[in-house]
Image (cartoon, rainbow, N blue to C red):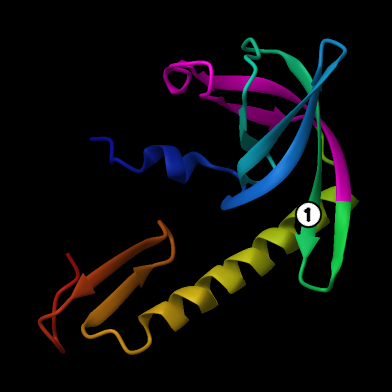
Amino acid sequence: MKENNDFEQRREHQRINTCILVIISAYYNSLEGMILNLSCGGAHCVLEEFLPLKTKVQIAFKLPMSTFESHQLRLQGTAIRIDHSTKTNAYDSYKFAVQFGEVPPYEKKIIEDYIAEKKKNDDNQLNILLTGCPGIYFFDGVHSRLFVSVHGVGAKQP
């Protein structure tokens, strides 16, 4: 029997939610958009323009690092999934997934460092948010889910 999280378990690379400006180049056009989540294997992006499935793209973005530096990355990829349902009028956008081709080791290390740093910062912000809140909190780091119980000590995780 398949579990609901089979898709997550198949992921080869750690993925993190983010919001990074991106330039996607395809068919001699450059389109501005946002990266919604990122891994060493690809990115989930949003654009106002439609990109057909299997479109070869170049994706360029800067990763902000806490040391007041940023790294410009340019990677080759392919649009492998498109969410058509997100475009309902002229002001909406398309969400799509880009699978990167081969990521050079230096760029892979930069992405891994960014993900680790962002995850650490996100976890710290979560801890700050929870400070002073009543209840018992369970954080499932594998699936990034937070469980809350207001029944006190000994409460079971849902």
Decide: is 27 above or below 48: above
Q: Quadrant of the C terminus?
A: bottom left
SS category of the residue bearing label 1: strand
- The number of callouts visible is 1
Q: Is residue 77 magenta?
A: yes
Q: Is residue 128 magenta?
A: no
Decide: is 76 above or below 105: above
- Is residue 93 visible to us here? yes
- Magenta span covers which residues? 72-101
- Is residue 105 visible to us here? no
Q: Position of residue 154 (x, y in %)?
A: 14, 86
Nearest the viewer among 121 and 113 is 121
Q: Position of residue 55 (x, y in %)?
A: 71, 13
70 horizontally vs 89: left or right? right
- Which residue appears at 62% of the width and 14% of the height? 50
Q: Residue furthest left?
A: 151
Residue at which label 1 appears? 63
Q: Would you identify the image quadrant in which residue 99 lies?
A: top right
Q: Would you identify the image quadrant in which residue 104 lies?
A: top right
- Which residue appears at 28% of the width and 77% of the height? 137
Name the amino acid, label 1: Leu
- Which residue appears at 23% of the width and 35% of the height? 1
Query: Does the magenta stretch mainly form a helix, a strand or a loop?
Result: strand
Nearest the viewer among 114 and 13 is 114
39 horizontally vs 142: left or right? right
- Which residue appears at 64% of the width and 10% of the height? 52
Q: Position of residue 19 (x, y in %)?
A: 63, 49
